[in-house]
Image (tube, helix red, strand yellow):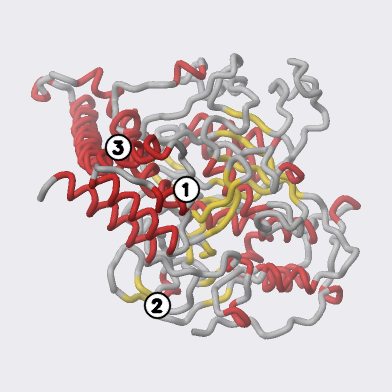
Amino acid sequence: MNRKFCTIVTLVAVMAASSLLAQAPQNWFHLDPSKDGVPGLSTESIYKRLPKGKKGKTIIVAVLDSGVDYKHEDLKDVMWVNEDEIPGNGIDDDKNGYIDDIHGWSFLGNAKGENVVHDNLEVTRLYATLKKKFEGKDPAGLSKTDKADYAKYEEYKKIVEDGRKSAQGNLAQFAPIKELYDQLVKALGTDNPSLNDLKAFKTSDQRLKRVSQIFVQGIEAGETFKSIATQIIEPYDHYYGQVNYNFNPDYDPRSIVGDNYADFNQSNYGNNDVKGPDSKHGTHVAGIIGAKRGNNIGMDGVADNVRIMSVRTVPDGDERDKDVANAIRYAVDNGAAVINMSFGKGYSPGKAAVDAAVKYAMEKDVLLIHAAGNDGKNLDLTNNFPNDHFQKKGKPGKKTATNWIEVGALNPEIGENLAAEFSNYNPEYVDVFAPGAEIYATTPENTYENLQGTSMAAPMVAGVAAIIRSYFPDLTADQVKEVLVASSIKQNRKVIKPGTEDEKVDFSTLSKSGGIVNVEKAVELAAKTVGKKKGAGFQRMLTAGDLAPAAKALTLHE
């Protein structure tokens, strides 16, 4: 097939895939299973039942992510502000070890304001380390210990080289599409043309003419020029990043940070740029948790009385265990009651340090919410670090974190497609499922987009947890977890197993609870649960008698 024609065909396929997406209500994750026929959280329902005039305790939720646009129109009023720090004076006023940490901290930069954008995958870093030792060596002459490491070197090498080769193939497919898009934008003189601009566009280049027609068709079908362009630019950028950074063993950006990377006890590094160079993922997560409710701007977050603390931890690539451990400790030490972690990776050489930080959060009564991952796999068969299983002698131990909730993702429909096809699952490692597909939320520079992933499901649960911790501050982190899991709406139905075309399994086998998180049920159960925390600072704001009657029994129907 002609390469140029193939490029057009690929672009048509991209557009077709977009148009086939089911159009759920934009706020479907807030809706009610009984009344609205979608597996939403019943957020709108519970706020109607809460007594007017009774406000809960303000809860700090830490977002460990790529960064958060703290100036976003829908987030600026809900950002955590460190009142003990004087902005911009270059002094650590509160003596917490971090200078001018007004809205949080970044462990991905330096004092000069330089930031890490891209990084390797962890497997690439492991390969790069062993490559220095074993490249060109004859394994026959190695010691027993070195032979074991050499076997790992060979394993990592294959993963990295195969991954890079696959990415190069995908990049070669999308590069011509991206080139055509760039040519079209240049010819039009704008990267956001109107429908009339596109219809009036004249060119003798038949490829550009066809591409402009595809954009016209997409816009007339309800898309925007920007949304179509995103479907071209983001795959190109993704594969470009995989080739040049993620799977590139010669790339190492850590010198930008300037820390002693081998010293896991070091924590005084980074900067206060909590937005960073690419905060799309983190801004979206933050909006799900707590975008300002009721302001008639953009969208509403799940929780109504939160402050978002941004802790920049995740680059374009795999997060580093040292940064994750320090980010958890920073969030705990600065007042977070809930920590959201919408990231994961397949290898964790510094898991001991992360485990220690998780135990620290347990001791300080902080709840950790983590995304189960987007491989469409059973977590018995694939790793997704960090996790709640504490390591013992380098292997998963039996002891687990009691303050940890692992979250799988739901589609916006009830029936056999309830579980999102990309979601990881497991009846031991995953606790609950929550909305995670077609989620409309905040993105940088006062914009909003639909994104999907368990990365979106985790902050749903973080938002619900914040509501419970707000109105029932006498409940411990462990109790809040128990409430969310026990109150989840159980499913007695066959669903298509994630990662398969049509294999059916019981939804109850995909997680510990076999249920989907529901804030209305959670509040009802929390109101009946006796809190373990005593004292004036832990007086609950609601009792069961404060709630207005439920409009309808909560069930899921098709």
Q: Secondary structure at mark 1?
A: helix
Q: Identify the mark nearer the N-term, 1 or 2.
A: 1
Q: Could you tell me residue 91's position as x and y percent?
A: 76, 16
As drawn, 198 above or below 110: below
CA gap between label 1 and label 2 equals: 33 Å
- Give the residue number, with chain letter if any, for mark 1: 226
Q: Which mark is residue 254?
A: none
As drawn, 65 above or below 452: above
Q: Identify the mark nearer the N-term, 1 or 3.
A: 3
Please report contact status of discs 1 and 2: CB closer than 8 Å, yes or no.
Answer: no
Disc 2 vs disc 3: which is toward the camera? 3
Q: Secondary structure at mark 3?
A: helix
- Give the residue number, with chain letter if any, for mark 3: 179
Q: Is any part of residue 155 visible from this angle? A: no
Q: Which mark is residue 416?
A: 2
CA gap between label 1 and label 3 equals: 16 Å
Disc 1 vs disc 2: which is toward the camera? 1
Q: What residue is rendered at 51% in x and 65% in y?
A: 433
Q: Amino acid at mark 2?
A: Glu
* Nearest the eye: 257 or 262: 257
Q: How many marks?
A: 3
Q: Is residue 255 left or right of residue 16?
A: right
Q: What residue is rendered at 32% in x and 40% in y?
A: 178
Q: Amino acid at mark 1?
A: Lys
Q: Dividing the picture into quarters, in which one does residue 470 lie?
A: bottom right
Q: Could you tell me residue 99's position as x and y percent?
A: 71, 20
* Nearest the eye: 111 or 213: 213
Q: Could you tell me residue 321's position as x and y percent?
A: 48, 33
